[in-house]
Image: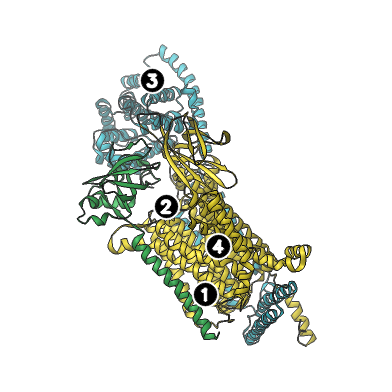
Amino acid sequence: MIVELGHYALVLGLALSLAQMVVPMIGLRTNDARMLAVAPSLTVATFLVIAVSFAALTWAYVTSDFSVRNVWANSFSDKPMIFKITGVWGNHEGSMLLWILTLALFGALVAFFGGNLPSRLKAAVLSVQGSVTVAFALFILLTSNPFERLSPPPLEGRDLNPILQDIGLAIHPPLLYLGYVGFSICFSFAVAALIEGRIDAAWARWVRPWTLVSWVFLTAGISMGSYWAYYELGWGGWWFWDPVENASFMPWLIGTALLHSALVMEKREAMKVWTILLAILAFSFSLLGTFLVRSGVLTSVHSFATDPERGLFILMILVFFIGGSLILFALRAGTLRNGGMFHPVSREGALVLNNLFLTTATATVLVGTLYPLLVEAVSGEKISVGAPYFNYTFIPLMIPLLMAVPFGPLLAWKRGNLAAAAERLWLTAAISLVAALAIAWLVYDAPILSAFAYALAFWLIIGSFADVWQKAGFAKNGWSKGWARLKGLPRANWGTALAHAGLGITTLGIVGVTTLEDETVLRMTPGDTTSFAGYDVAFNSLTPGKGPNFTYDKGIFTISRDGRVIGTVEPEKRVYVASRMPTTEAGIQTVGLFSQYYLALGDAVEGSEDIVVRIWWKPWVTLIWYGTVVMVAAGLISLSDRRLRIGAPVAARRRREAALAAAKPEPAE
Amino acid sequence: MVFWLTVLALTAAAIVIGFRPMLRGTGSAAPDRVEDHEHDIAVYRHQLEELAGEEARGSISPVEAAQARNEISRRILAVEDRLTAAGATGFSTVPRRSGAATLALFALVFIPGLTLIIYTGIGSPAYEAQPLAMRLEAMRDAAAARNQTQDQLRDLVVRAEDHLRDNPDDGRGWDVLAPVYFRLGEVGKSETAYRNAIRLLGETPQRLSGLGETMVTAAGGIVTADASALFDRALDANPADARARFFAGLADVQIGQYEDARSAWTVLAADEGADMAWRAVAQQSLARLDETAPAVENSGRPPVLDEATIEQMQDMSAVERGSVIEGMVASLDERLRDQPNDLEGWKRLIRARIVLDQDDGLRDALERARSAYEDRPDELESLRAFAQGLGVNVEEYWP
Amino acid sequence: MTRKQKRFAVIFSALAVLGGAVALVLTGLSEQVTFFRTPTDIVSTANASENDGRLRLGGLVVMGSVETLDDAAVRFAIEDANHAVTVRYAGILPDLFREGQGIVAEGTMQPDGTFRADTVLAKHDETYMPREVADALKEQGAWKGEASAETPASSDY
């Protein structure tokens, strides 16, 4: 019964989201307050019903109900419980259900926390959000129904793709979806603003926290995904410029741009058209990503779904929402009066520069991702655009942006003083250069060009705090007073500084691992010892064994330096029983704080006892992910700033009534 | 019924939650336009406070602060202008009947109606959930119940045998005992009993097809020429005999006349006058035939036995189940002796032995499977996992 | 600065960045793109310069051709319906690399007519054939469908 209840709940979710879309729209047309008032409650109902549906599917997975086709195709009775649960979204149908659950969740959050929104705007936002839910609920019911049944039920399932049986997968897609789908709220806000014809500073203020929430989740999701690929695929890479990675990276770039341009819109009522466009684009890129992944049009290490019917359906959704919103945008954009003027050298100018580089970089990624499809469609020639292209185009665009970051917060609104800002940063520049040269020459004897890259990373990390440093005014106020002022700074200031510093830390990790990385491939027999990158690696043993639903060969290696043991790693080669699929589990040993020693087992060499072993030395590699952790923390700190949360004007009505009673205008505050 | 009540409760709850503001009455929940503008003004007031804070901290110069304050004030004025302009066309505060009707239409007709139409179109409301643990338990319970009835039957048989020893010419006794022997899996004794009954009491379609069935089972599921002749005779006497009709169809399959088998089984499955159990078996075999006909054409094997057939047959009376399943299992078993290199076949056999609760058969199947795959650890591992998945403690069989 | 000059400055810098990006994209797409080739393409091309630069070589791994060299590098041959090309690769072969399986090797052609790969791709799906390889084999009429996969049970997913 529970399974069918879930199926019914999903259909009910479709009907409720249709109501959520249509009723407030009628309310806006006829100016009927009651219809506007039901928008939030309908949204909450939609969410609850879809949550019931998702819970039912999860229950089917947990109890190994193989009468559900989706469970049979992706689960196995012996699988550990955690992977039974993650199996729910480790496949196409289940992940689409997670997608609309997230969609409905964000709607419900707006309904819940949106007390500070004017009722018309809120109703319009929820209505647009409802329309997206309708489209995807239809998509699921028509092309990818997870509740399809099998009669009679088979006795055993087919198992989840072993490469997806990993704890990284438990967290990575839900986080990514929270980010991806979170931008649907920005999109709904943008379309609602266009429908309502109110695009102003207040709108930007309301949309900012939602952008920030999505950005935080997306950052965390991409970072998790990158780490997952790093240790699960056994290829030693942390970013492949794979189309699926690009699909999540493009919304992140646009979302970052939106975060910055919404700030300008809120403070100065400038960049209005642009901000609305970015809000539409951020979600459009999320939809594009979904299309690229789900339609299987790309050759990619990630794609686990190929079905032209589904692809076509998502393409229709894509065209409808992107096309529709852009047409609305074109119709309304002309009527916008632009707001505050500003000098090119100013906070606004710096944020424009940020947007310029971020969107241009997004465009180059987009071109590189779609170009192979285009070429194949036009000429039939098959090409692939890989890391060389992306590094070649993306990095040159990032360098000036990263160099400019510390300047931004130091410039005043409207008209800034570049010379003064530069003056405040000279010490930062000097420290960065010295540190970089020290690393490049003394420690690692690296080429001079890499020193520049190190300097850039340090410049970012240290320079990010120039603004808070200056606001504390230690020089002027002395230590104790400066310290007090530092603590009194709004959290958003700290958020900005930390987020930029996090970016610098990630940059440092990337620079470190790119310039200093070393790898070797060699044949080893148990008992062998080899020396690599200053460490000694002893191959102790190779033992076969059995896990819950796989068999493995486990190598045990001891890593030591100058006779001191640093750690033991146990890379494995696994074969999963149900699917007979082999996978590689890398053995990773963190050395010091940030560097890693990474071992992967290859195949046994025929006619000998040797096995091929690949060893990487990955200096500073974990900084890449620590940096993103700092960015996520920074986002959360900003979110907690009370300035982002404006309470609803509760007292408004009473005050107005009092004012009317006194029959005179309210005294000015 | 419970399902539909739950569905009703879910729908009602969702609609109550969804239209909650309507239930509270219209007055207090309904927003108005003046209040809406207060939301904007709240934002700008907030900006002013922020500005004051920054100025107090010295983050911005007094000149900048003054400029910014001017801008924010202009925004507040713009909001108030808009409010005055819109004052005439505020929200309709008088409840309009059309609005209430639309809402009621959505809540009471549109949402439940649409859901019901779509769900009944694509859902399977009558299909219970099938958690694996419950299914395995049900299988074990069924096996235990079967053992119990068999024990009772054995007592009966002992008494009947005593009686027949004294009165070997009691045709009625043999007639009663024949199907019971069959049900207990004593195929040889059953065959003898049938023959005695026919000798003493004469042929009836029932006895002829019963005898045929024992012969098919004895032959490992193959409809031998003798058995086939018996079924033909049974059908001559009574063309409606379901058992004979089914086995005639099976005989057709085994000589490659799939179309004849298909039409015979189709008619049987649709025949409302025939025994339900045999109709179900025909239906299942028909489905199997559609799926496997090409494969059958290649190998000339009898239709494959899979868990679907087995489970279907659990609903049949034990006699019929005994004949069909045992026959098919026996033929599968036989085939695996000749062609042990068939992983799927071994899995089917193991599953069948578990479902039929034949521990000796299971032990035999596992041992033979192990010797067949001794040098192939992957396959062996897959078999082990498969058996474990069905709740078998493999270690017990594979020391 | 006048209003006009400000606007000019903003537009000019935007155009400069965009222009730079377009230049990067265009040169990137003409120089950094990897073309897909089958062994037949490589062997039968009249113009040797077509085999310059980075290539993705796709086909089936020739049965019995895989050998591990003393330096732990691997040598194997990739074939299509007509020709075979020898590939040398230093690194760990992907989990699903098997003889007879369709794979894609990425790298450059050497003057001696062998292919030096720095990446070898096989899909993490037993029945999977890299898309380019499948298409190329279909064109040559050598496609045998998915029937050769070891576990037909999962071929419809």
- Determine whether label 4 and label 2 are within 8 Å by CB: no
* Of marks 4 and 1, the one in the foreground: 1
The amino acid marked with disc number 3 is: Trp
Q: Do labels 2 and 3 share a chain?
A: no
Report the coloring of the rendering: by chain
Instruction: Give the alpha-carbon distance from disc 2 to disc 3, as whole Å.
Output: 67 Å
Q: Is mark 2 on a helix, strand or loop?
A: loop
User: Residue A475: in sight, yes or no?
Assistant: yes
- Determine whether label 3 and label 4 are within 8 Å by CB: no
Where residue B211 appears, as percent x and y from the top left, is 32, 25
For disc 3, the marked residue is B174
Residue at position x 51%, y 28% in the image: B144
In the picture, the disc for residue A182 is 4
Q: Do labels 1 and 3 share a chain?
A: no
- Chain cyan in the figure, letter: B
Please name whichever residue, A223 or C140, is drawn nearer the observer in this view of the structure.
A223
* Of marks 3 and 4, the one in the foreground: 4
For disc 2, the marked residue is A303
In the picture, the disc for residue A411 is none
- Chain yellow in the figure, letter: A
Q: In this image, A227 relative to A465: left or right?
A: left
Instruction: Give the alpha-carbon distance from disc 1 to disc 2, as whole Å.
Output: 33 Å
Chain C drawn colour: green
Local crowd at mark 4 within 10 Å, few (<14), some, or many (≥20)? many
Instruction: Give the alpha-carbon distance from disc 3 to disc 4, as whole Å.
Output: 78 Å
The correct choice, above or below, for A211 with respect to B352 in the image is below
The amino acid marked with disc number 1 is: Trp
